[in-house]
Image (spheres, grey):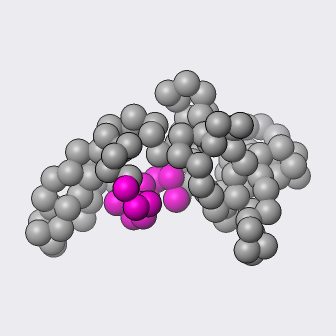
Amino acid sequence: MPIFYDCQRCTACCRWPGQVKLTEAEITALAAHLEISEFDFIQRYTRLRPDRRGLALTEQPDGACVFLDGRDCRVQPVKPQQCRDFPNGWRFEGFEKFCRAVPREAAESASPPA
């Protein structure tokens, strides 16, 4: 049976250095949520991805997401799809050592909860 992970909102994934890729629609939603222009959002919170094929969120000096504030996500209602998909839609090798998501068997015909 496939395994589904129930997120416990431990924020470990938000503290792991990496690349949160952004779509144009996500940039629009994030800027609106923060009540700033898309131009200002891009200047303040993004960087060019290493492959030069788009933008990614910047990180705090320790590698944590720029929007992580303690144990809270400042953009939770509009967080990027990549963040929403972790750890079921994508994951990094060894994530289980840091992530507190609870694994459970999922029926193959059932979709994971949203």
The reply to whether residue 5 is visible in this rendering is yes
User: Where 112 falls versus 77 (above or below)?
Assistant: below
Q: Is residue 89 magenta?
A: yes
Task: Classify residue 65 by image quadrant.
Answer: top right
Q: As drawn, is 83 to the left or to the right of 86?
A: right
Which residue is located at x 42 percent, y 55 percent? 86
Q: Residue 54: horizontal and vertical position, in percent?
A: 74, 69
Which residue is located at x 15 percent, y 61 percent? 106
From the image, give the main secondary structure of the stretch colored magenta: loop
Q: Is residue 84 magenta?
A: yes
- Tally of marks: 0
What residue span does the magenta drawing correspond to?
82-94
User: Where 66 falls versus 43 (above or below)?
Assistant: above
Which of these two is toward me, 44 or 111?
Answer: 44
Q: Residue 40: horizontal and vertical position, in percent?
A: 87, 46
The reply to whether residue 38 is visible in this rendering is no
Task: Classify residue 23 by image quadrant.
Answer: bottom right
Q: Farthest residue toward the top? A: 70
Which residue is located at x 59 percent, y 34 percent? 68
Which residue is located at x 52 percent, y 29 percent? 72
User: Where 113 falls versus 9 (above or below)?
Assistant: below
Q: As drawn, is 18 to the left or to the right of 51?
A: left
Q: Residue 1: horizontal and vertical position, in percent?
A: 11, 69
User: Where 36 falls versus 43 (above or below)?
Assistant: above
Q: Residue 88: horizontal and vertical position, in percent?
A: 34, 60
